[in-house]
Image: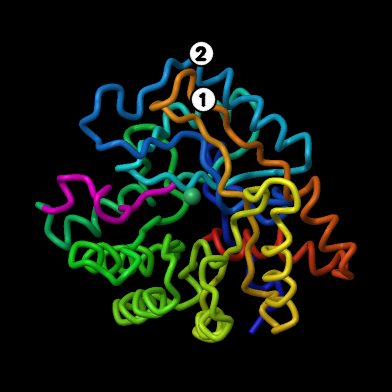
Amino acid sequence: MTEPTDTAARGRRLHTTLGALGAQDVGLVLPHEHLLVDFRPAGSPGFARADPAVFASVVDPLLAGAAAAGVTALVECTPPGLGRRVDLVLDASRRTGLPVVVATGVYREPWVPDWVYGASDDELEAWMHRELTEGVEGSGVLAGFIKISAAEDGIRPVEERVVRAAARAAARTGALVGSHTTDGRVVLGQIDLAVAEGLAPDRFLSIHTQTITDPGLRQAIVDRGAWIEFDDVGQGGRDGDARTLELVLDSLAAGQTGRVLLSHDAGWFDPALPGGGTPRPFTDLTGSFLPALRAAGVGAGVLDELCVRNPFRAFAR
Ligand SMILES: [Zn+2]
């Protein structure tokens, strides 16, 4: 199923805070990170707020550290409803020179913004389409993909409306739809809904694949043609990546190399915590995880596919 990269990537662009980048412009890309997330209800005092100077003091070192480790771009996966702040992300990206891909889309309940419940299906689709093609909140930055989610025990009605609208907006633009979904059967249901709306299966990404414990379900998602993402690198503390390492090696052995993405789901400035909290860095992948894969016998060409070619093929349009 792996297309020759040159063909798959030709003419496609990764839309970032620093403009549209071609395959030749980027190397290692982190497909799932965050610079600011606020899990509190949207009406909470100080929701999604950050003093720009404090934000810079927390986030700039994270981005600079990533760049120093060889990261050439990262994807900021925070949708509206979880405190998306493209203005702050754009400033941090400009200061550090690291291109960042930002998201449009709608997260799961209870983080669905109020206006979404009152919007028609066409309005939802048009809003996502506009953010992908005209930009986000007057920032001039185009959304680089659509982030959605679903409840763990099944797709709620509003989430079904979102996946359908996202699929239609993505089908019109070639954008990727990435879903935070922890149950593999729910993922397959989302893919069915998206494909019914005209989305090509390779425009769908199943986020947090490490939570899908049944290898048969992971295989089923790949067999449909969708992407899978192991994005908890660095989260387990000392030796904590052993399980993720095993999952990735299993996935490679199962022939899924051309559909696998790797990231940390790290960061981030949390407005609910004093000073934004203490974020995790974006450097465990390059610092320890890739060396561990190498030590396990994974060759340079495969590592390049996982961290350079795959993220571009998944997110560029
Ligand atoms: Zn995340």
Q: Quadrant of residue 307?
A: bottom right
Amino acid beneath label 2: Ala
- Frontmost of labels 2 and 1 is 2
Q: Quadrant of residue 158?
A: bottom left
Magenta-drawn stretch contains 110: yes
Residue 228: image tag? none
Crowding near the residue tagged with mark 1, few <14, some 14–19, many ≥20 C-alpha atoms within 10 Å = some
Residue drawn at x 50%, y 21% is 55
Residue 53: image tag? 2
Left or right, 121 with reference to 269: left
For label 2, being within 8 Å of ligand 1 is answered: no
Amino acid beneath label 1: Asp
Crowding near the residue tagged with mark 2, few <14, some 14–19, many ≥20 C-alpha atoms within 10 Å = few
Left or right, 298 with reference to 156: right
Residue drawn at x 56%, y 69% is 228
| 51 is higher (above) or lower (below) than 309 | above
Query: x and y percent of residue 172 in the render?
Result: 35, 66
Marked residue nearer the N-terminal end (2 or 1): 2
Query: x and y percent of residue 204 in the render?
Result: 46, 70
Tell me how far mark 2 sits from mark 1, CA to CA: 11 Å
Residue drawn at x 67%, y 75% is 258
| 133 is higher (above) or lower (below) than 306 | above
Which quadrant of the figure contains the N terminus?
bottom right
Instruction: Label 2: state its secondary structure.
Output: helix
Left or right, 91 with reference to 71: left
Q: Quadrant of residue 173?
A: bottom left
Please name whichever residue, 233 or 56, is drawn nearer the observer in this view of the structure: 233
Q: Which residues are magenta?
A: 103-117
Query: x and y percent of residue 114 in the render?
Result: 16, 45
Question: Which residue has dot 1 on it?
Answer: 91
| 234 is higher (above) or lower (below) than 192 | above
